[in-house]
Image: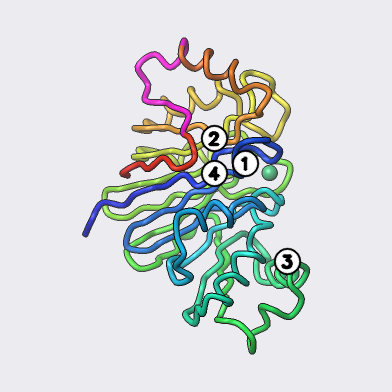
């Protein structure tokens, strides 16, 4: 089995003028898309034309920059001839929520008699979901909407992704010993309640003993400040700011 790999499709916050919404393409035993905001389908289409590539999409929470790409993604797959099922994994009520979102985007296009099967699967805190050789587990962060941080484990390789939100005791536990952590870092040090700051993420990296950390979803007006503060405060930790298109072996 080859070592799983991560491709950053987007690394931006909701309103970044340059960067697509934060989204990760995981390629291992399965191909997973972690979050699918409104600018993500186009980023995906720039790296693949294969409608069968994805086995599942994992949605951290219901804000538009994390899920409003789903209607376009699903209709594109259908138009390109996909027949095999796609799983969409999310928090409580994902089936109803997904049906409403797809119907709003392209009414009728994803109805069961007109589309490949779209299976909704609820991720539950405290339970592990097995997909092939991949184990998924989740924990709630502190965000303005319920948000599930996710741990994707395949053998010794562990990718963790925060979605949105400040760290919690539960997410710190979820990330313990991760090979790669991708964490939102919206602000340098302004605590707005609902997003992470650089201080919080650096403490988390130490506490959870994470090997490599990538900071995403940075407020665009704070980006250059955050880069220079990170340069002075990283102190031997393996923490960096990725660009879209960057690949990382997990
Ligand atoms: Zn959000």
Could you say which is closer to the camera, residue 80 or residue 236?
A: 80
Per the image, the residue denoted by label 2 is: 216
Instruction: Name the residue beneath numbered marker 1.
Output: 164
In terms of sequence position, does the residue under pointer 2 or pointer 1 come before the other? 1
Mark 3 highlights which residue? 101
- Whether 26 is drawn above or below 131: the answer is above
Q: Position of residue 5 (x, y in %)?
A: 34, 49
- Residue at image x 61%, y 44%? 21
Picture quadrant where residue 135 is located: bottom left
Binning the other alpha carbons within 10 Å of mark 4 as few (below 14), some (14 to 19) or many (20 upward) gives many
**Would residue 234 be counted in the magenta stretch?**
yes
Q: Main secondary structure of the magenta part?
A: loop
Badge 3 or badge 1: first in the primary sequence: 3
Look at the numbered disc 2 and say if its residue's Cβ is closer than 8 Å to ligand 1.
no
| Residue 32 x, y percent position in the rendering | 45, 59
Is tag 3's residue or tag 2's residue first in the polypeptide sequence?
3
Q: Which of pointers 4 and 1 lies earlier in the amino acid sequence? A: 4
Mark 3 Cα within 10 Å, few/some/many (few <14, many 20+)?
some
The extreme bottom residue here reads 113
Provide the residue span drawn in magenta.
232-242
* Residue at numbered disc 4: 10
Give the label, 3 or 1, closer to the camera. 3
Q: Nearer the viewer, mark 3 or mark 4?
A: 4
CA–CA distance in space, label 3 to label 2: 25 Å
């Amino acid at each position: 089995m080859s070592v799983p790999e991560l491709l950053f499709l987007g690394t931006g916050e909701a309103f970044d003028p340059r960067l697509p919404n934060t989204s990760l393409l995981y390629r291992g035993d399965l191909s997973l898309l972690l979050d699918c905001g409104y600018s993500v389908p186009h980023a995906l289409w720039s790296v693949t034309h294969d409608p069968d590539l994805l086995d599942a999409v994992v949605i951290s929470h219901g804000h538009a920059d994390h899920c409003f790409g789903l209607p376009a993604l699903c209709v594109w797959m259908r138009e390109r001839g996909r027949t095999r099922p796609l799983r969409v994994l999310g928090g409580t009520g994902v089936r109803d929520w997904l049906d409403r979102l797809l119907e709003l985007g392209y009414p009728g296009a994803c109805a069961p008699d007109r589309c490949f099967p779209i299976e909704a699967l609820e991720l539950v805190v405290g339970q592990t979901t097995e997909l092939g050789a991949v184990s998924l587990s989740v924990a709630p962060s502190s965000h303005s909407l319920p948000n599930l941080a996710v741990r994707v484990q395949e053998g010794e390789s562990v990718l963790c992704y925060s979605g949105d939100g400040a760290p919690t005791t539960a997410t710190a536990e979820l990330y313990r010993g991760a090979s790669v952590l991708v964490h939102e870092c919206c602000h340098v040090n302004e605590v707005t309640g609902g997003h992470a700051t650089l201080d919080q993420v650096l403490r988390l990296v130490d506490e959870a003993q994470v090997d490599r950390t990538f900071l995403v979803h940075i407020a665009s007006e704070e980006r250059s400040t955050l880069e220079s503060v990170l340069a002075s405060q990283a102190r031997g930790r393996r923490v960096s700011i990725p660009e879209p298109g960057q690949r990382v072996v997990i």
